[in-house]
Image (cartoon, coloured by chain):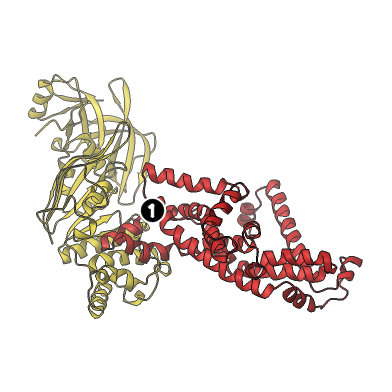
Chain colours: A yellow, B red
Amino acid sequence: MAEVAYVNASRIFSGNPPVRAVDQLQLDVADGEFLVLVGPSGSGKSTALRMLAGLEDVDEGAIEIGGKDVTNVPPKGRDIAMVFQSYALYPHMTVAENMGFALKLRGVAKAQIKEQVAEAAKMLDLTKYLDRKPKALSGGQRQRVAMGRAIVREPSVFLMDEPLSNLDAKLRVETRANIAALQQRLGTTTIYVTHDQVEAMTMGHRVAVLKDGLLQQCDTPRALYDHPANAFVAGFIGSPAMNLKTVPLTAEGAKLDGIVVPLSRAALDKASGESLGEVTFGIRPEALALVSSEEQGMNMTVELVEELGADALVHGAVKIGEGTERFVVRVDGRTPPTLGQQVKVAVRDTTEIHLFHPESGDRLEA
Amino acid sequence: MGSRSARTDTGPVRRVGIVAVWLLVAFNIGVLLWMLLAALREHTAIFREPWGLSSLGRFGNFVKAWSDSHFGQAALNTVVLVVASSVVVVAVSAPASYVLAKTKTRISGAMAVFFALGIGIPVQVIVIPLFVMMQDAGLVNSLGGLFVLYVALSVPFTVFLLIGFFGSLPEEIEEAAAIDGAGALRTFVQIVLPVARNGLITALILNLISLWNETFIALVFIQDSGKQTLSLALLGFLQTQQYSGSDYGALFAGVSILVLPMLALYVWLGRRIIEGLTVGAVK
């Protein structure tokens, strides 16, 4: 077990102009922590993981595992284990051989290997399949073998590169919980890469959001959700995505069709300090509510209703300034409005409003 | 049924294509069958009624072909030479193509092209300089010399084939091996080679077939009848018939002796060859 640190680490791919796939990444992962790297494709999350694995060069900065600089150490000297998206099982070896390969290379005695493999197999419910080749296994079983191969070695850090993306939806949810539980039990530092923000939120102790090779924010799932550092994180974390609209600013607050939403003093001061005429206004679908026509609220025309069972998502057009913008409101699944209906939408709680700089996207209040 | 036929019958072009393929297959099987039948018939009967089946059962043709032109020694020469050269070609080409396939530098790209160029050079163009060089090295009229030539001339195609094959192998398996603690050599021997088995077998078989049938270089470089390969023995058999009177039954028997082993190889490993050649084409 060990802590992990990226010290201003960069990976630059040659080209014209060169691409900074990972740009000055500064990130400390505590011993035993489950850290999730999340971002859209091309954000550099996989590259960052591969730098830690030693599969990708570090062009600037350094990488430390357990307080030791491993920037120039080859993968096998880093005491890490990795689970690949494709699992990368050795097709010509049995499950037991796959899991024991690293131990065999380390010169561990045969009996000892057998014992450790059997133990890991038991943990992952693979005992029955130890003599099978990977191609005779289902996707979920292969995934578990890949996990087993990592566990058997008892490394100080687990690296996982989208290990669930080849599973079907139901199995993914199940395996998600299993991996989190297993990590809890083993207490091994884990870096987990995914593009799925639900996976990130449910599994990670902390989540690091990347975009274009730059770390946007790294915090607990709750903090990311409640206090996104910028408009990108706000839009990326949460499903359905936060409503993010550019709205005109008045002395009292943000002006939407029918209402002026009051904003905090601090935010207004900051906006007026930069003499902004408009701001990026963010509100999550569940922080909006349908209200009766007598109450204060913005007018919305219902354009689409997505029924999810417990909830329904109402998509509708709201006039903002000259044009119209689409908002999503999460409502009770039992009483959704009908298509084309005119409804009034109010903000549930003004503390749930997020304000961002219209150009830089940075959060406006503290 | 409905969806299946909708998927397979994609139009008249495809139907014409299917008919053309089957005609080609039928033609080849027909020729082969005719040759095998003729190999068991008497010379004059073949000319009297080429499509008939009279005098069938003359297994003596095979005995005659075998004994008249030293097919026994030639067969032994060929088997040893062809198997040894094919194995060595693959053994030499595999590591080379693996490195060329996996390193992405300007030099490796240029070297891959260099190997590919070798395929395009007709052997007739280089046979005279080759002969001079081999003579200086004292390797003319020797099976060892022929072995060197076979290996050297087969490397370009084999490397070219295997570069494509190794390139199609998933890199993640090698990365997994690197993380598991395997060095480059161990990764190649214990992980890459077993995974690449089908490709290597394909390369081996294609070399076996082309070297088995090779006549031109053997004709130029081998003079002693004791050092003949099968294709040379057959050629010699054809030539002796000009003096001793032709016997087409025995001649076809000789051709059959040359062709049947390769046919057997195809029947046995044909699927492997196709799989090896199309790997990576379909995920």
State whether residue A117 is above or below residue A1. Answer: below
Answer with the quarter of the image where residue B34 lies.
bottom right
The N terminus of chain B sits in image quarter: bottom right
Is residue A296 visible to us here?
Answer: no
**Residue at position x 68%, y 64% from top?**
B232
State whether residue A286 is above or below residue B38. Answer: above
- Looking at the rendered structure, the kind of residue marked 1 is Val
**Residue at position x 55%, y 49% from top?**
B119
**Residue at position x 22%, y 34% from top?**
A231
Q: Give x and y (percent) for residue B97.
A: 43, 54
Residue nearer the viewer, A259 or A65: A65
Answer with the quarter of the image where residue B144 lies.
bottom right
Q: Give x and y (percent) for residue A52.
A: 21, 51
Mark 1: which secondary structure? helix
Q: Give x and y (percent) for residue B95.
A: 41, 58
**According to the image, label 1 marks what residue?**
B99
Q: Give x and y (percent) for residue A307.
A: 36, 47
Q: How many numbered discs, if any?
A: 1
Q: Is residue B214 left or right of residue A206?
A: right
Q: Is residue B183 left or right of residue A62?
A: right
